[in-house]
Image (tube, helix red, strand yellow):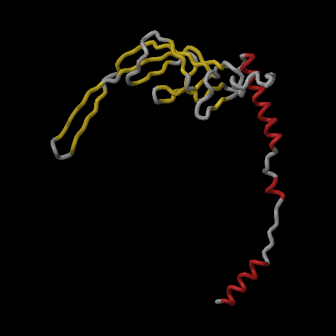
Amino acid sequence: MALYLRQLCAQFRNIHVQTSSKLLKNVVDANAEKNERNEIVKKVNDLVANNAHGRLFAVVHLAGKQFKVTDGDVIIIEGYWPPDVGDKITLDKVMLAGSADFSLIGRPILEKGLVNVQATVIEKTMSHTKTHFRKKRRKQYMRTHFYRVPQTFLRINEVSIQDEVDNPKEVRGLETAVF
C-alpha cells in the first residue's frame, strides 16, 4: 500500500499547470465598461430631454400586485381600496419604466420622483357573482357559496420621466459647493 501511495504522489509531482491566453480574453476592462455605461446614460438622457422616446410604459406595484401600464390604460384593483371616484393619484412604487428604445430597472423600485405615473379613480363597483363550491365524496356534503368582491377601476392619465437618469436629487449641485 505504501508503495502505491509513493507512486501516486510521484505522478502528482510531475503535473505541470499551464495558463492559456484564451481564458484571459474574457476579462473586462473597467474603464471601457465605465465609458460604455456613461454613453448609454447620455443617450437615454438625450432622448428624455428631447421627448423623442415615444410611448412610455411602467410597471407599478399597487395593492400587492404588479401592473404594466401606459397612457390611457384602465386597471382593476380587486378588494377594498379607500380612494373615492374622481380622486387623482400619483403611483410612486414604479419598479420599471421604459420605451421601445430603453428600459430603467429599479432594484427593487426606481427612485421616487424619477418617473411620474398619474391615475384617476373612474369607478367603484362590485365584481360579477363568483361561485365557490365545496363537496366531500361519499359524505353527502355539498356547499355552494356565492360572493362578490369590491373593485376599483383606475385610468392611467400619464406616464412620464421627470428627471435625468443616474443623477439623484440629493447629489446634484455638490460639484460647485464649497465645504
Image quadrant assignment for residue 152: top left
Q: Residue at x 46, y 14 (%)?
A: 121
Single out the residue that lies furthest toward the front. Answer: 179
Q: Is residue 55 above or below residue 136?
A: above
Question: In the picture, which quadrant includes the C terminus?
Answer: top right
Q: Residue at x 66, y 29 (%)?
A: 103
Single out the residue that lies furthest toward the top. Answer: 86
In the image: residue 155, left or right of residue 178:
left
**Image position, residue 38 (x, y; %):** 79, 32
Q: Residue at x 75, y 80 (%)?
A: 11
Image quadrant assignment for residue 12: bottom right
Q: Residue at x 58, y 34 (%)?
A: 108
**Image position, residue 147 (x, y; %):** 28, 26
**Image position, residue 1 (x, y; %):** 64, 89
147 or 86, which is in the foreground? 86
136 or 107, which is in the foreground? 107
In the image: residue 172, left or right of residue 129:
right
**Image position, residue 32 (x, y; %):** 83, 40
* Number of on-image labels: 0
Image quadrant assignment for residue 54: top right
In the image: residue 6, left or right of residue 65:
right
31 or 73, which is in the foreground? 31
